[in-house]
Image (cartoon, grey):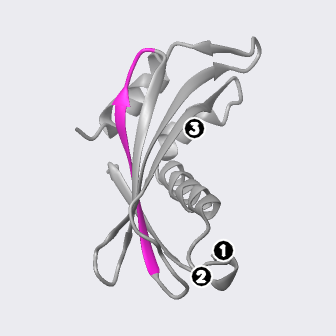
Amino acid sequence: MFMNTTSIDLRVRGFHLDGYGHVNHARYLEFLEEGRWDYFDRHAGLMGVLSRGDVAFVVVNLNIDYRTAAVAGDDLEVRTHLADLGSRSARMSQQITRKSDGALVVRAVLTFVLLDVANNKAASIEGELREALEPLLVS
């Protein structure tokens, strides 16, 4: 059974902080990427299609809305789901919340395209890959 929304927990460490004592904005990119890797790890059928190496997902846009600061010692939850599936691109939605009070720390939407590796061009999301992605959509 697929989990359409995945969740991982992270603890904010001192090396994540900037000079103001809160998580540096660039570190949130890493936290979000951890969430996406976990998402793909949990969907073996999807990874089976991608692991052949003839196609790859390529990020073409990432929008991040920083809502509140996280600080050292905060336990964060990163939630990830597939939000939209088009013919040539798809969007993943992610959010990071602070576990102690449920505060929304970051909201992000990432757009990716499917790359035909041999031709180095965007390809249509169809066939076996589309069949693996469609059941994962969260409205």
- Residue type, mark 3 in image: Gly
Q: Mark 1 to mark 3: distance in Å? A: 39 Å
For disc 1, the marked residue is 18
* Residue 109 image point, x, y percent: 43, 42
- Residue type, mark 1 in image: Asp
For disc 2, the marked residue is 21
For disc 3, the marked residue is 48
Kindly identify the residue that appears in the image at 55 percent across and 85 percent down.
72
Which numbered disc covers residue 129? none
Q: Nearer the viewer, mark 1 or mark 3?
A: 1
Q: Mark 3 to mark 2: distance in Å? A: 41 Å
Front in this rendered view, residue 74 or 127:
74
Count of numbered circles on the image: 3
Number of residues whose C-alpha sits closer than 10 Å to that of mark 1, classed few (under 14), some (14–19) or many (20 or more): some
Mark 2–mark 1 CB contact (< 8 Å): yes
Q: Mark 2 to mark 1: distance in Å? A: 6 Å
Boundaries of the magenta span: 75-87
* Residue 45 image point, x, y percent: 48, 40
Local SS, label 1: loop
